[in-house]
Amino acid sequence: MKSRPTAKPIPDQPKLDFWRTLCVGFAFMGIMCFWEVYDYIMPLILNRNFGMNATEYGVVMGLDNLLAIFLLPLFGAISDRSSGKKYGRRTPFIVWGTLAAVVCVVALGAIEYAQYGKLAEGISDLSVLTQHGLDARYLGAEYQTIVEQVAQGVKPEGDALAMYNEYCTALYSAQSAFAGAVTAQNKGILAAFICVLLALLVAMSSYRSPAVALMPDVTPKPLRSQANAVITLMGGAGGLFSIVLYKLLAPNRYQHHIALFCVLAGVMLGILAAFLLTVREKKLVAIRAAEESQWQIVDEEEQSAQGKLDKPKAISFALILLCVFLWFMGYNAVKTHLSVYATTTLNLDDGLVGIINIINGVGGAVALLPVALMASKWGRKITIVFGLALSALAFVPCIFFTANTPNVQIWFPLCFILSGFGLVCVNVNTFPMATELSKGSNVGKYTGLYYISSMGAQAVTPMFAGVFMEHIAQQSVFVYSIVFIALALVAMLFTKHGDNKPAKKQKMIEYFGEED
């Protein structure tokens, strides 16, 4: 008769169970796997295949965040109240939300394929595009010779480079206008696309708060910055995998993405299977409770009769949410418009923009451990302030970049990657600061409030930034971003609660805990 496995002994000092956190991170990995593809290709699809300008596709790109303002706290609170008798409070939301999203992803790819069929014949016909704003002079021998040389791999320089960039800007504008005209004649396809898109966004919102709340459910409070670094690492791995998929499967400038959508759906299912095979939510929650008892971790908020924050902590919580709102207003303005901006204004190749995202993803993953160590040594607040300052400064040179800037294909990615490191510093620590002020019974509610702030910003900033880009200058998006990031820094400076006490110096293996 086989003996039942016994639980590993609880260590005398708080140490993060790396494997437990890694497995829990599969839920967030699946979420980020989707969003990295969505955030990159959806503006391109809306601009290139449906003919929307920056303001119009900015409105559509804000829909997911507008819905999330209402749905994330709703589903977070529902999962808080769930009995979870069989599978736990969060797991059912993760399973059914992922399955619904996968169905919608495949359907969205099929609709985009139908739209592409309407565009295929005219999108590259210059004689057709002259009817949609392409100046006839771009059909002349001088411009077409340069275009042919570029197609043969000859890199233009000087006046030829300026002429080529001018040609590309005019061509892309005419192609978008043509796509808009085709869409106007086939409004049913656009309506179907938007309806399925809304269903997809609801499905994704239904399990994001439960998936994120699972980490604090199974992690003692003093270890949540380290745990969030691991969760963010898993999310970064999912995003990086999606970017690689895009690089391998994405078509040329004007083609459909159905293969990418189908493979993405398969990857999401595979990640869900990994989560279900490795995570037993009820067991992990019980282990966390035993650890807190062993380490005598007292949850002051849980001991409160009302469970309400006192005034100083409530003010700090509000400032944390304000910082998150302002930060996302700034950074996501650039991220949302990145793919269109880089390929049109800077005339960078689609493949290079994909590589920028890959490098940014790898850099973010590499940065997680140093950022977690920074938070342990300096505290969360100082690490966040550092990240905000770095991100704002990194975007300053971008204001002055043009397609003719020497080595722009090197300098622009470098600035974006540096700002991405700042993003890691902020994201790894703001969520633990918010949940530090929660209690075990309402962590899902606090998670929802956190995402109201981030998603609220992301709901409106694509549209506002698009207005700046359309009516002032494309580069104005960076001025817009810097201002909001700087305001976020000010809000964090006034935050007094939610920080962690800097830890005593530890060996690396002690910091994350050993596996027995």
Image (cartoon, rainbow, N blue to C red):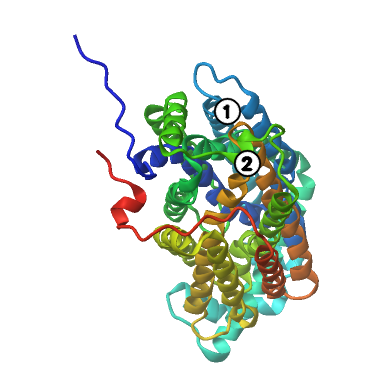
Q: Quadrant of residue 468?
A: bottom right
Instruction: Nearest to the eye among marks 2 and 1: give it.
Output: 2
Q: Residue at x 56, y 75 (%)?
A: 394
SS class, disc 2: loop
Q: Is residue 366 left or right of residue 484?
A: left
Q: Which of 115 and 383 is in front in this view?
A: 383
244 versus 19 height, above or below: below
Q: Around disc 2, counting alpha carbons within 10 Å, would you say few (fewer than 14), some (14 to 19), or many (20 or more)? A: many
Q: Which of 81 and 107 is in front in this view?
A: 81
SS class, disc 1: helix
Query: Does residue 204 appear in this view?
Result: no
Residue under numbered circle 2 = 438
Query: Does residue 445 appear in this view?
Result: yes
Circles 2 and 1, Cβ within 8 Å, touching? The answer is: no
Residue 381 % position (x, y): 57, 62
The quadrant in which the N terminus is found is top left
| Type of amino acid under label 1 | Phe
Residue under numbered circle 1 = 93
Q: Residue furthest left?
A: 1
| Type of amino acid under label 2 | Ser
232 versus 304 height, above or below: below
> If you read the primary sequence from the N terminus, does the residue marked by circle 2 or circle 1 appear first?
1
294 versus 428 height, above or below: above
Q: Nearer the viewer, residue 150 or 12?
A: 12
Q: Between marks 2 and 1, how big is the CA–CA gap?
A: 21 Å
Residue 8 % position (x, y): 29, 31
Residue 401 % position (x, y): 60, 81
The disc placed on residue 347 is: none
